[in-house]
């Protein structure tokens, strides 16, 4: 007998839960529906049963939807997650997707919306674990640009890579302008194409955008590919030299950085660092500090450790966990705390790229 | 009835993310706290221990710090160094938190 999928519905309003239960009963695959009125209760159910989909509200007392999702995404990576909310702020939509949630839906209010929601949910239930395609992960940015240009399309392509963002303007199958942080034109185009991962969205064309790139898209892509190959070739140089050069270039790009350090766990080689005479004590502290609060996150169920910032009379410092390592940036003490937080994320994204 | 109560399934309470502050002296003793009474004391001591060790470790690494902020995806911890002790603020982050 074929096993029925299980769906867990989480909303603090019991009346709404009853309505959703009724709606979900119309799903063709006939899944089993469980309900929870609080985050802690949902966590207990997730521990006890194997669910296929979690449908979660955002605004809830005590433990809100984002807190639940951040814990769930880490503890149950195979669980499909759907946010069903009345919060219409776009910032929450992007935050929810950044957590790795599969679907973000505003609570349906018409019969058509309910129908569409059920279709999406059915498709989510039908996807096999570990297989199938999600998004356009197999396509590079170069492929996407080529597709747009070959189709003679006009569009604005907005690309985000963590805290970094860039925009490409395509008009009648040609790339006419690009922008990435402070860079513009061809330099911005090359910078955006050097990012290895990210998200993109296609927006409506902007025909009034002034043209700053005059090369054909083919020439532009070829030159960029060549430049990327060359920099990949440079990566073949002695690892320590290459690491030092990469870190030095980060210090050049961001004002206020006094040192950059990649602290590795245990004795996994000497730390990669730039701007420090003796990086070992700092590396040991950064690694211990990251480990200390990583384990605290586990005890608390507070979601993933994102960043640690320290402010001092001589220097400010930020530590961001990166896999097993800790990425540590020392800032001049005059750099304000908020800037330390935001810019360190950009430095890390740049280094990863 | 007592036997039935014994077998009935009681959902175990999951500790909610705490909100409040506490002060710890240089020896790790909690001086004052605004956290809920049911917040586990052992966890409180664990947090203060980690914070104090971080401040001391930074000092030893020639990086004296007067403030520490630890950001988790659903929670924020802020600590101020107070002559070897610390005051620690615990803040759960909500969707409407503008600082996140």
Image (cartoon, grey):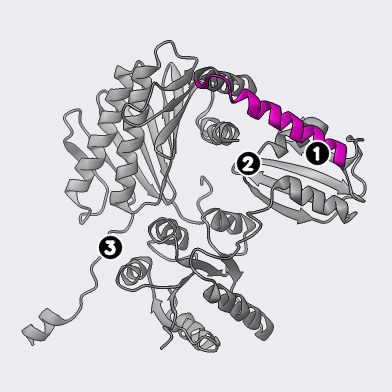
Residue B7 sits above or below residue A175 on the image: below
Give yes or no for residue A234 being in the magenta stretch.
yes
- Which residue is the extreme one toward the top? A277
Cα–Cα span, label 3 and label 1: 54 Å
Q: Position of residue A178 (x, y in %)?
A: 80, 39
Foreground of the two, A201 or A236: A236
Give the letter of the chain under mark 2: A
Cα–Cα span, label 2 and label 3: 39 Å
Badge 2 and badge 3 both on one subunit = no
Numbered mark located on residue A221 in the image:
1
In front: label 2 or label 3: 2
| Mark 1 nearby-residue class (10 Å; few <14, some 14–19, many ≥20) | many
Foreground of the two, A178 or A124: A124
Residue sitting at x 53%, y 67%: A83
In front: label 3 or label 1: 1
Which residue is the site of mark 2? A196
Cα–Cα span, label 2 and label 1: 15 Å
Residue sitting at x 63%, y 41%: A196
């Amino acid at each position: 007998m074929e096993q029925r999928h299980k769906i867990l519905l989480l909303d603090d309003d019991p009346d709404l839960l009853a309505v959703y239960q009724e709606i979900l009963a119309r799903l063709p695959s006939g899944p089993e529906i469980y309900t929870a009125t609080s985050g802690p209760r949902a966590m207990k159910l997730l521990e006890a049963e194997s669910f296929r989909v979690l449908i979660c509200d955002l605004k809830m007392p005590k433990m809100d939807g984002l807190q639940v999702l951040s814990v769930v995404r880490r503890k149950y990576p195979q669980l499909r997650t759907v946010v069903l909310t009345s919060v219409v702020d776009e910032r929450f939509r992007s935050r929810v997707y950044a957590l790795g949630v599969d679907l973000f839906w505003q609570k349906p209010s018409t019969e058509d919306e309910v129908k569409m929601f059920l279709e999406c949910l059915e498709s989510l239930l039908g996807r096999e674990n570990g297989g199938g395609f999600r998004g356009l992960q197999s396509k590079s940015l170069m492929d996407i640009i080529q597709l747009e240009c070959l189709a003679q399309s006009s569009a604005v392509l907005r690309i985000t890579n963590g805290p970094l963002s860039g925009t490409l303007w395509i008009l009648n199958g040609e790339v006419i302008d690009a922008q990435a942080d402070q860079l513009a034109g061809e330099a911005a185009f090359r910078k955006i194409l050097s990012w290895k991962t990210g998200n993109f969205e296609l927006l409506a064309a902007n025909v009034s955008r002034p043209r700053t790139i005059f090369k054909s898209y083919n020439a532009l892509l070829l030159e960029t590919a060549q430049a990327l190959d060359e920099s990949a070739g440079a990566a073949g140089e002695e690892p320590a030299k290459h690491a030092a050069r990469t870190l030095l270039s980060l210090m050049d790009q961001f004002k206020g950085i006094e040192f950059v350090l990649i602290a590795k766990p245990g004795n996994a080689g000497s730390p990669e660092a730039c701007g420090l005479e003796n990086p070992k004590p700092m590396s040991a502290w950064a690694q211990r500090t990251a480990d200390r609060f990583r384990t605290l996150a586990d005890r608390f169920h507070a979601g993933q450790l994102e960043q640690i910032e320290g402010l001092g009379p001589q220097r400010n410092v930020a530590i961001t966990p990166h896999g097993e390592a800790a990425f540590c940036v020392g800032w001049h003490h005059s750099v304000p705390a908020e800037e330390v937080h935001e810019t360190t994320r950009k430095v890390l994204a740049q280094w990863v790229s | 009835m007592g036997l039935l109560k014994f077998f009935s399934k009681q959902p175990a309470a999951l500790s909610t993310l705490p909100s409040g502050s506490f002060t710890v002296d240089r020896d790790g003793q909690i001086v004052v706290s605004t956290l809920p009474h049911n917040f586990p004391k052992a966890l409180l001591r664990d947090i203060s221990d980690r914070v104090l060790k971080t401040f001391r470790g930074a000092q030893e690494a020639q990086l004296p710090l007067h403030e520490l902020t630890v950001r988790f995806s659903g929670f924020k911890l802020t600590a101020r160094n107070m002559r070897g002790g610390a005051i620690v603020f615990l803040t759960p982050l909500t969707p409407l938190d503008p600082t996140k």
